[in-house]
Image: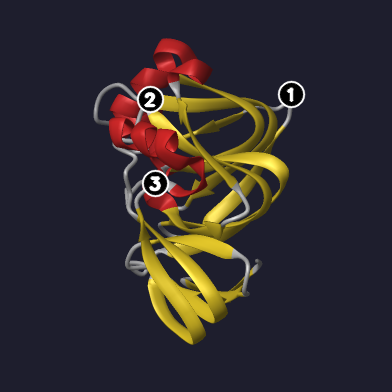
């Protein structure tokens, strides 16, 4: 169920009988055809356990199930939209950044501390993002939201990527994250407010970085 980019802040999806997709509530802008939108109370395809994990984690962004036959245009808050195409890999993304995604994708919740240990937990506290992150795995497309557009940066074993935690949007692949301090880093770029942090991502995959430090 591919997305078509209408412009930088709107996407259109074709809905066909027998397939479904999920969207954030309030994300539907317009539609054509016979399409239904129903509240999803079980946490998407992850079922009840996914819902419980999301509630505990504060990752309880409400979803709508979209079904029927027609085309739907999505957008939310004037945010820029990035379409991520998954070919069997896993996308790690904060729940409130999800605009819409293919219902064929397997949805879950991951505790960030399991990747980054104590520093993974600190990351959640420092960035204001949840200690848990939503995961989407399989073959399909995901539309995520960001401020100011998104750039994709490749991560390789020989070349890890350091990202301002506030600019982090999502990542995919076999990637580990670690939060580290960088004293004076913000002072050097004119944003000094005390101790600074960098999110280091290593392994093999891709990180999506927004052109802003503003939260959604």
Q: Earlier in the sequence, mark 2 or mark 1?
A: 2
Q: Position of residue 91 (x, y in %)?
A: 59, 41
Inspect this view and state whether residue 40 appears.
yes
- Judging depth in this view, the residue of 49 and 93 nearest the camera is 49
Q: Quadrant of residue 50?
A: top left
Residue sitting farthest toward the left: 193
Residue sitting farthest toward the bottom: 32
Q: Which residue is mark 2?
A: 123
Q: Which residue is mark 1?
A: 157
Label 1 near label 2: C-beta < 8 Å? Answer: no
Q: Which residue is mark 3?
A: 42
In space, the residues marked 2 and 1 are separated at their CA atoms by: 22 Å
- Judging depth in this view, the residue of 142 and 46 nearest the camera is 46
- Residue 81 vs 125, above or below: the answer is below
How many numbered marks are there?
3
- Judging depth in this view, the residue of 32 and 36 nearest the camera is 36
Q: Residues within 10 Å of mark 3 (few under 14, many from 20)?
A: some
Residue sitting farthest toward the top: 118
Secondary structure under tag 2 reads helix
């Amino acid at each position: 169920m591919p997305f078509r980019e209408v412009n930088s802040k709107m996407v259109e999806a074709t809905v066909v009988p027998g397939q479904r997709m999920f969207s954030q509530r309030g994300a539907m802008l317009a539609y054509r055809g016979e399409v239904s939108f129903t509240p999803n109370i079980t946490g998407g395809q992850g079922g009840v356990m996914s819902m419980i994990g999301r509630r505990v984690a504060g990752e309880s962004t409400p979803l709508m199930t979209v079904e029927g036959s027609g085309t739907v245009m999505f957008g939310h808050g004037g945010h820029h939209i990035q379409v991520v195409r998954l070919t069997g890999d896993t996308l790690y993304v904060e729940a409130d950044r999800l605009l819409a995604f293919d219902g064929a994708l397997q949805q879950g919740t991951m505790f960030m501390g399991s990747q980054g240990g104590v520093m993974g937990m600190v990351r959640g506290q420092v960035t204001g993002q949840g200690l848990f992150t939503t995961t989407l795995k399989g073959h399909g497309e995901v539309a995520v939201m960001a401020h100011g557009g998104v750039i994709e940066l490749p991560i390789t074993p020989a070349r890890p990527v350091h990202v301002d935690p506030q600019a982090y949007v999502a990542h995919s692949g076999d990637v580990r994250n670690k939060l580290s301090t960088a004293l004076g880093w913000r002072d050097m770029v004119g944003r000094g407010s005390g101790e600074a942090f960098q999110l280091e991502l290593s392994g093999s995959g891709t990180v999506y970085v927004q052109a802003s430090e503003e939260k959604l």
